[in-house]
Image (cartoon, grey):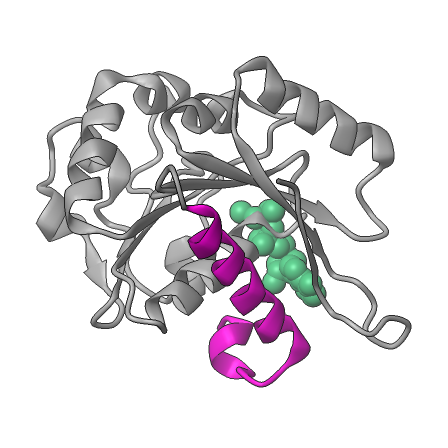
Amino acid sequence: MFIVEKEPKSMAAESYRILRTNIEYSSFDKEYKVIVVTSSEPEEGKSTTAGNLALCMAQVDKKVMLIDCDLRKPSMHKRFKVSNLIGLSDVMIGKADLTMATHMYNKNLFLLTSGKISPNPSEMLSSKVMSYLLESLKETFDYIILDTPPLKVVTDAQILSTKADGTILVVRAEKTKRESVKNAVDLLKNVNANIIGIVLNGIDASRNKYDYYYEYKK
Ligand SMILES: Nc1ncnc2c1ncn2[C@@H]1O[C@H](COP(=O)(O)OP(=O)(O)O)[C@@H](O)[C@H]1O
Ligand SMILES: [Mg+2]
């Protein structure tokens, strides 16, 4: 369950709505359609952020495709409680049709789970097929949200950032080290990723006014 659905009136849910608004309003000159959600390390809240953001975009009638691009440690199928028998990796190798592989969560939110664990995720994600897939999805969807593995561990999120219009970096409050954040920003800058915002996830609500705090960079 995601907090924007479970507790829509919470401060945390409100923060995701602020994040959504910021993305919407920053798409003046250039449309931010394909958005990567990543972080430096595991367990910082990438999937939590990607899921909540996708859901709250869908709540305002945007057509959203959420793709689990963490082909090494996928989690979206568990979070949304759907099957992962076929998904992104199967579509990529031509073993499954996109429409067949896509789950319709509600009238606006569609989910493409990771599919079978593939032996070469980086090659798959950097392939032209992936670029074509994103380009074709842009015609149907307002937003395509990509959940990714950690930057520190593999190059997948860096690769995907080059194919995306914007990248959101998640930082876990009181866990992620300063060096780690700097390293993540450097890795993204190295590939000229467009960092559109940083999400500070998991601020202690008993000590702070906000559960989540979203800092907008540009
Ligand atoms: N702000 C938060 N407060 C409490 N638990 C959280 C918070 N953000 C994430 N979690 C939990 O921490 C775990 C890791 O989060 P997840 O989003 O899967 O991280 P990642 O995708 O970066 O590995 C999950 O069990 C998730 O439910
Ligand atoms: Mg994850």
Instruction: Give the overall secondary structure of the magenta segment.
Output: helix
Q: Residue at x 21, y 46 (%)?
A: 86
Q: Residue at x 13, y 44 (%)?
A: 98
Q: Residue furthest right?
A: 207
Q: Residue furthest front?
A: 29
| Viewer-proximal residue among 140 and 149 | 140
Residue 181 image position (x, y, % from top left): 76, 33
Residue range in magenta is 1-27
Residue 78 image position (x, y, % from top left): 42, 60
Q: Is residue 50 above or below residue 52?
A: above
* Location of residue 154 (image quadrant): top right
* 55 displayed left or right of 18: left
Q: Residue at x 35, y 72 (%)?
A: 60
Count of numbered tags: 0
Quarter placement of the C terminus: top right
* 207 displayed left or right of 126: right
Residue 66 image position (x, y, % from top left): 34, 52
Q: Is residue 217 above or below residue 100?
A: above
User: Does the segment drawn in magenta span residue 44?
Assistant: no
User: Does the segment drawn in magenta span residue 6?
Assistant: yes
Residue 203 image position (x, y, % from top left): 79, 63
Q: Is residue 144 above or below residue 191?
A: below
Q: Residue at x 50, y 29 (%)?
A: 157
